[in-house]
């Protein structure tokens, strides 16, 4: 059996790493059984191309070099999707795989599943059935189209099974396998825990000319800052990249003001900044405001282990990333999700998780921030988020009736 799996953007890499490992394990068990041996090719669409957004994850997570890189790069959604389809079609016609495996909800997921189905090839979607219900989110469109086309829909939780059933997906196409991101978390937990937080910060600091002089003060686990109200070892982690938060000045500026004016007065904020967010801060004339705040520590995008290490000790996470919401759930980090909706309800407090939706309304963010500070870590483990999801994914594909 020949499988082509696809990655395009940063959140795909942690999902494909365990899948490739599980294929290797599977192949070791079928030495004398040519039929079930899996020949695997990895295609990178090249949507994310910076070393810090892509290559560093391949190295850190031991992902083999892609067999093909489509080198699509940046562009509008139509440009990215169209160029991916044109280039991916050539790969499919040459390789004629039995299965195309797509993960997550990025433009590569959509473009490659459409291309494959147009050639009447079988598609498996890992992380199927997530729904935010928000059609202004590009990822929601990607999820809907991919799931509508896929032959095998591997879901991370049972709420996703329900979503698919409601949309009329045939029962035999749906398989609940658990969350593959958590395979990567579990496989890398120990390695991450050995990193020193101060080293992560110093190695990844953005060169901003700002006066972040307090940073080397502490040698121990956390970050200490001078001044009133500082509490040793407390720090917040921030990530923000969604167009709904960063593409409008009227939304981005009040969030930044809250962070620099209120959160930074309580504790340092570590912000590994996404290229889109940086670009927008500069475009709106807000970059100086960000760099001049002593307790807002701006970092380059950081590696997988580095982010996991920060998350393990953070007092609070403020994020619009779906993956971080899930990791906070398992690690128990109180998480303010800077969105009005989520496709990952299982991570919310009402479902036992650690995250609360705060949107981009400052009063709501403030209120939940205060509440979260009083809450300790409460790690949760939703069903089948056990580190063995990738093995179930491979088995589901191998067992699929032809
Ligand atoms: C994409 C995904 C999103 C995911 C996010 C994680 C889609 C629709 N969106 O959004 O689901 O959460 O990745 O990062 O697929 N850029 C660089 N270097 C890079 C990549 C991008 O500088 O390596 C810049 C580009 O110039 C671009 C901007 O960042 O303008 C945004 O990149 P893009 O790939 O369009 O989407 P993301 O916002 O990263």
Image (cartoon, rainbow, N blue to C red):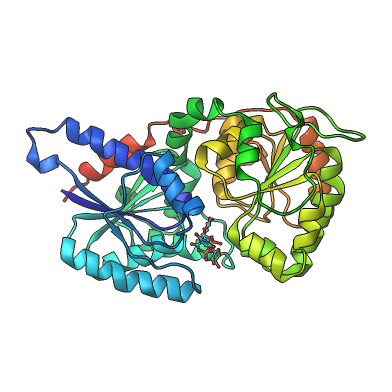
Name the residue: 55% across, 52% down: 343
- On screen, residue 72 versus residue 303, left or right, reads left
Residue 33: x %, y % from top left? 8, 36
What is the count of numbered marks? 0
Report if residue 99 is visible in the image.
yes
Which residue occupies the foreground of this view, 353 or 268? 268
Q: Position of residue 235 (x, y in %)?
A: 74, 36
Query: Which quarter of the figure has residue 237?
Result: top right
Query: How far from the left and from the top, in percent, is residue 238?
Result: 68, 46
Between 349 and 42, the residue placed more toward the observer is: 42
**Is 7 located above or below residue 378 in the figure?**
below
The residue lying at 86 percent from left, 34 percent from top is: 226
Q: Is residue 5 left or right of residue 387?
A: left
Q: Nearer the viewer, residue 108 or 10?
A: 10
The residue sitting at 61% across, 31% down in the picture is 312
As drawn, the residue found furthest toward the right would be 228
Answer above or below: position of 150 versus 296.
below
In percent of width and height, residue 216 lies at 73, 33
* Residue 399 visible in image: no
- Residue at figure coordinates x 71%, y 29% from the top left: 222
Figure quadrant of residue 325: top right
């Amino acid at each position: 059996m020949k499988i082509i799996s696809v990655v395009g953007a940063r959140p795909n890499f942690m999902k494909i790493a365990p899948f490739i490992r599980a294929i290797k394990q599977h192949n070791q068990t079928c030495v004398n059984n040519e039929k079930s041996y899996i020949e695997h090719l990895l295609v990178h669409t090249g949507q994310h191309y910076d070393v810090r957004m892509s290559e560093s994850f391949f190295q850190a997570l031991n992902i083999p070099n892609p067999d093909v890189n489509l080198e699509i790069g940046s562009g509008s959604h139509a440009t990215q999707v169209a160029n991916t389809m044109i280039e991916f079609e050539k790969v499919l016609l040459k390789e004629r795989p039995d299965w195309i495996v797509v993960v997550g909800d990025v433009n590569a997921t959509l473009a490659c599943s459409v291309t494959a189905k147009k050639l009447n090839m079988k598609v498996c979607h890992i992380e199927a059935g997530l729904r935010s219900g928000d059609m202004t989110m590009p990822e929601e469109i990607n999820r809907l189209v991919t799931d509508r086309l896929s032959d095998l829909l591997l879901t991370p939780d049972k709420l996703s099974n329900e979503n698919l059933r409601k949309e009329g997906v045939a029962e035999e196409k749906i398989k609940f396998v658990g969350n593959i991101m958590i395979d990567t978390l579990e496989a890398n937990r120990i390695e991450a825990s050995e990193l020193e937080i101060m080293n992560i910060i110093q190695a990844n600091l953005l060169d901003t000319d700002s006066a972040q002089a307090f940073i080397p003060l502490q040698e121990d686990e956390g970050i200490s800052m001078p001044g009133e109200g500082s509490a040793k070892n407390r720090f917040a982690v921030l990530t923000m990249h969604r167009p709904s938060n960063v593409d409008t000045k009227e939304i981005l500026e009040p969030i930044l003001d809250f962070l620099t004016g209120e959160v930074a007065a309580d504790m340092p904020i570590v912000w590994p900044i996404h290229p889109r967010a940086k670009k927008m801060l500069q475009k709106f004339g807000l970059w100086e405001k960000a760099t001049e705040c002593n307790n807002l520590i701006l970092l380059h995008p950081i590696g997988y282990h580095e982010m996991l290490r920060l998350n393990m000790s953070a007092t609070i996470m403020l994020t619009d990333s779906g993956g971080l919401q899930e990791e906070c759930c398992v690690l128990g980090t109180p998480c303010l999700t800077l969105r009005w909706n989520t496709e990952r309800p299982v991570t919310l407090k009402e479902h036992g998780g650690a995250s609360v939706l705060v949107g981009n309304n400052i009063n709501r963010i403030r209120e939940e921030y205060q509440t979260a500070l009083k809450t300790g870590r409460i790690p949760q483990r939703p069903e089948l988020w056990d580190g063995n999801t990738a093995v179930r994914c491979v088995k589901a594909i191998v067992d699929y009736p032809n």
